[in-house]
Image (tube, rainbow, N blue to C red):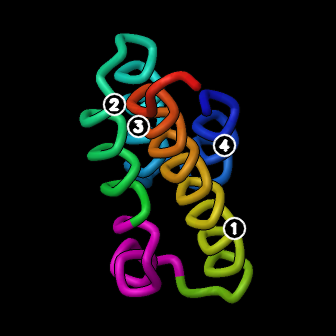
Amino acid sequence: MRDLSARMARRFPQHPAHQHVRDAATMLDLGQHDGARRHLNAAIASLSPLQIRRMGLSHDEDHQDAKLFMDQAHRHLLLVKDHEDARKEPAQ
């Protein structure tokens, strides 16, 4: 997840999404799955086309890269949820 944050920071240094992904990784390290999910949801929301346009990023390349980062953040969100589900299921 920190690798994703670093790639996002290089591509969109002015955009806060990479900070949310970094914070999600920190929360996950602390075992705070709810916090990780909140930060990943914030990163995903901030990468929406409307938010990208509001940041002044209007080229197709910007939107394509933002969509890729959004998909990767969403995948991390699902992995956090999967990890949480695996912890809750009784051992068989």
Which is nearer the N-term, disc 3 or disc 1? 3
Check disc 3 and give the amino acid type: Gln
Question: How many residues crowd mark 2 within 10 Å: few (<14), some (14–19), many (20+)?
Answer: some
The structure residue drawn at horizontal position 35% and vertical position 11%, both measured from the top left corner, is 30
Which is nearer the N-term, disc 4 or disc 3? 4
Asked whether 37 or 10 is in front, the reply is: 37
Which is nearer the N-term, disc 4 or disc 2? 4
Which is nearer the N-term, disc 1 or disc 2? 2
Q: Residue 79: horizontal and vertical position, in percent?
A: 57, 44
Per the rendered image, the range of residues in magenta is: 45-57
Residue 33, labelled with which disc?
2
Residue 10, labelled with which disc?
4
Q: Which-is-in-front pick, marks 1 and 2?
A: 2
Check disc 1 and give the amino acid type: Leu
Check disc 4 and give the amino acid type: Arg
Q: Which residue is mark 1?
A: 68
18 shown above or below 71: above
Marks 2 and 3: in contact by CB < 8 Å? no
> Is-magenta flag for residue 75?
no
Secondary structure at numbered mark 4:
helix
Q: CA distance from mark 3 to mark 2?
A: 17 Å
Q: Main secondary structure of the magenta part?
A: helix
Q: Which residue is mark 3?
A: 19
Q: Which-is-in-front pick, marks 3 and 2?
A: 2
Marks 2 and 1: in contact by CB < 8 Å? no
Q: Which-is-in-front pick, marks 3 and 1?
A: 1
Q: Residue 26: horizontal and vertical position, in percent?
A: 41, 19
Q: Which-is-in-front pick, marks 4 and 2?
A: 2
